[in-house]
Amino acid sequence: MSKHNDYMNLEYDLAGSRSKNRFKNELLWGLSKIFDLYKNNINFSVIFDYVCDIEVHFDDSYEFYQIKTSKGSSAYTLSKILKPTNGSSVLGKLFDLKHQSIKNGLDSKIALVCNKALKDFCNKEHSDREILEFNSLKTSCKDKIINILSTELGEFFDLDNSYFIYSEMNLNNCEDEFLGKTVRFYSEVTNSELANPLKLYNLLKSEIEIKSSYELACNDYDSLILKKALTKRDLDKILDLYYNGPTLTEKVTEFINSEVESFRKRLAWKKAFSKLYREFSVSSFLEALDKKVREYIVINIDDFDCSRFELIDKLYPIFKGDFGPEFEESDIRVFLLFVIIKLEEGSHEQFIS
């Protein structure tokens, strides 16, 4: 954790969060990165818009990605990405971050991600590879980069662990492209077909948009991960819930539709179900409370020879104090309904479908 504390010394920039909804290509590239990381089966946290556009945090190292897209046909030139705008160039900002990382003892790599290939100072267009190490360029090009960045930053170290990533993004139909990637990813990691691709895709995109749009500074690393990151554990949970959940959630839905007679109450419970559907997938609080309620029912099972409605009525006054003011009575009752049905089924499934 000490390295992560050192990370908190880096300068953050939240300006991008305020306009990030206009740049869904960046967010979707981050989702694609998450898919790739997950398939490698290593722990990670992907952070959106804090010290860089997209960051990958491992247990003992960091990766920083700056995303640039253009609808033009021409390649990105070194001259363009090294040209200062308001005092800083695109590449200069990345290398400044690399220098901050080095000064704070962090093992890091940086990459500029573009939807166009790079053209170097020798007029060579590097369209034949996805990942280009700046250190692999001709010596004359490297020397020029170093000279320009040294002038801009006032100091310079080297081009180690710095990359240009050529990522062909479909700017006109990016939603369709990433929906397809979601289907393929799910199939690869679960060996099963995705019954409702749009639902999972929208859930993941919604989580990323929430993380990206959080605009306040974080006081500590744990807060940063909670507010700005999607972790492997988060994705594990979402996939497990999505894969296992339809039977239970269908039973909850069926119960609400068939057993809740009041039209007003039925609408309130459906609204609560929709709210909890998303929250349960990422809430450690609800996960812990789920366990607490189930354990209480098991311990006191002799007191609960009653219907589901009666059981909910008995549990509600016991557990309503565990919920914050953002939870309405209908939210709590639907949560208790789900826990009851889950316990009846002897299931460890979670609240998602």
Image (tube, rainbow, N blue to C red):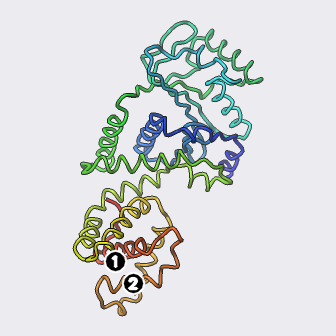
Q: Residue at x 39, y 55 (%)?
A: 238
Q: Which residue is mark 2?
A: 297
Q: Position of residue 54 (x, y in %)?
A: 54, 38
Q: In the rendered view, tell whether residue 55 sits above or below residue 75.
A: below
Say which residue appears at 62% left-offset and 26% top-offset: 160
Name which residue lies at 34% across and 38% down: 181
Three-letter amino acid code of the residue under disc 2:
Ile
Q: Does the residue at mark 1 contact the one at mark 2 (Cβ under 8 Å)?
A: yes
Q: Position of residue 201 (x, y in %)?
A: 35, 46
For label 1, the SS is helix
Residue 198: image location, x then y, percent: 31, 47
Q: Is residue 210 left or right of residue 196?
A: right
Q: Position of residue 41 (x, y in %)?
A: 43, 47
Q: Secondary structure at mark 2?
A: helix
Residue 340 numbered mark, or none: 1
- Position of 224 with respect to 26 (left or right) is right
Instruction: Count numbered badges in the picture.
Output: 2
Reply above or below: 153 against 60: above
- 329 displayed left or right of 217: left
